[in-house]
Amino acid sequence: MTSSLTFQPKLFSVFKHYNRQQLTTDLLAGIIVGIVALPLAIAFGIASGVTPEKGIITAIVAGLIISVFGGSKVQIGGPTGAFIIIIYGIIQQYGFEGLTIATLMAGIFLIMFGVLHLGTIIKYIPYPIVVGFTSGIALTIFTTQIKDLLGLSMAIVPSDFIEKWIAYIDCVPTIERWSALIGLGSVAVIALWPKLTHRFAIGKLPGSLIAIVLMTIAAALLRQYAGVTTIETIGDRFSISATLPQAQVPDLTWDVIKGLVSPAITIAILGAIESLLSATVADGVIGDRHNSNTELIAQGLANLASPIFGGIPATGAIARTMTNINNGGRTPVAGIVHAAVLLLIFLFLMPLAQYIPMACLAGVLVIVSYNMSGWRSFVSILKNPKSDVIVLWVTFLLTVIFDLTIAIEVGLLCACLLFMRRMAETTDVKVISQEINPEEEDSDFQLGNLEHLTIPEGVEVYEINGPYFFGAGNRFEEIMGALHHQRPRVRIIRMRKVPFVDSTGIHNLTNLCLMSQAEGIQIVLSGVNEKVQAVLHKAGFDTMLGEENICSHINLALERARQITA
């Protein structure tokens, strides 16, 4: 159960035991994470369909707010690969202003999630859904980078997944060899860098940054001394600005808001899942426990501030959070330093970004998509029960072929239906025909009264095992309908193993009592716990049945049955 006070930022509690040594490690971790975040922020911004500086602005603004107000000590926030597809789709349909409004709405939804204490619920979204749409997003990101990775000459890139690959195959003869070498070389550098340098201090530098530096220099040398002008750079496609934008709030109309509710909810749910998943993973590494509702409120504040300054949606980033932990970051100070480092780079070094090859950024995102795919988890889930496999494939295919919004909606629907089915299967109804075995009893049965083991003539005993809710409400009627026997005088329904009952269960019990009364049969309940009895009392069930027919244990129920049949 969460604390009564929902909003408890970790930053305000860590200073009680803060010291100079921790400050030093936080500063070092923040600097390294800021350097790691730079190429990713640029790549995520461009892949999302916006300019590179918008990706960095998002990392600065959202990263700062998430660290200051977040519920995790080590969470690093910013743009992530999970948002690329949904952002690109919103921009294509509603423009950048539509994305701004959707992000603002998502921020409000996230704050509501936190205030309503939904953090713990969101963490229980089925794992196959998370793996399904994460793997689907990874494959989609990989697909969108093929053109720049190989330098294909394509006037228009189809939006449909299958059509996109058909167009790529048709354009294979147009591969630009120098761009392909830059792109594939970037993939090789990022993949091999940690393996080749893990014994040296330089190995702490991110492979993506090394690849960008090396390939940018290589492209510049090829252009200068070999006359190669076919390698497209960021500057060829975008005009780079190093000035901070002014805060602006877009014009809001009811029609626009209504049209953006669905994508806004998708952004909010995706942001909540990814941030809480990142915080949970971090907890396991540092031995801490994050406040999920505070984290959601912080994510909401970040997504309110980011679009006002021209940014895009943001959330907690697992890779950058783990980089922070591995380099000694243990408080939100490291996240604040990371945002400050990005701000300094943005103000003083941003113009240099125009020389970065687009093929190199594509290589960075290819590695990101591979790491994001979680293919090992995907394969392991395929060995699980069929219901998990169905949810996994449905979510994955819908993400790839249609879009993330539909995938999340249908995936959650499938998971809910399968959950209801599993819950219904856990509830069964047992018929006890002649006597009750005392060895199978618990506190509901008084072992001293062994003469009460025998069920009197004209009495039937049914036992419900499990929750009596809408998924299992008809099971009782099906069991009785399948029995062919003489009509009893009393039906005892044992409910000692029923933890709760919902309105459908009450409705079915009421119908059973009315039908039994019409047939001259008396219903007696046995072993009803206090929680279930309170629900029945509130529904007026005890008045209809009679309080004397609701017994605390089977001994009293059998005695009551003897009184009725005497």
Image (tube, rainbow, N blue to C red):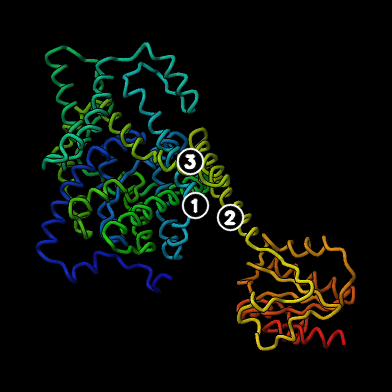
Q: State the residue position of label 2.
A: 419
Looking at the picture, how far across and down is residue 442, in whole percent?
Answer: 61, 79
Answer left or right for 337 relative to 497.
Answer: left
Q: Position of residue 195 (x, y in %)?
A: 20, 36
Q: Nearer the viewer, residue 459 or 12?
A: 459
Q: Which mark is residue 404?
A: 3
Give the residue type at disc 2: Phe
How many marks overall?
3
Q: Position of residue 348 (x, y in %)?
A: 13, 40
Place residue 187 in its image quadrant. top left
First along the sequence among labels 2 and 3: 3
Q: Secondary structure at mark 1?
A: loop
Q: Amino acid at mark 1?
A: Pro
Q: Residues within 10 Å of mark 2 (few under 14, many from 20)?
A: some
- Is residue 206 among the parts visible in the rendering? yes
Q: Is residue 446 above or below residue 425?
A: below
- Provide residue 360's location: percent of width, then percent of height: 25, 27
| Residue at 37 percent of width and 60 percent of height | 297
Q: Who is closer to the viewer here, 556 or 309?
A: 556
Q: Which residue is mark 1?
A: 126
Mark 3: which amino acid?
Answer: Leu
Mark-to-mark CA distance, 2 and 1: 10 Å
Label 2 or label 3, whichever lies nearer to me, is 2
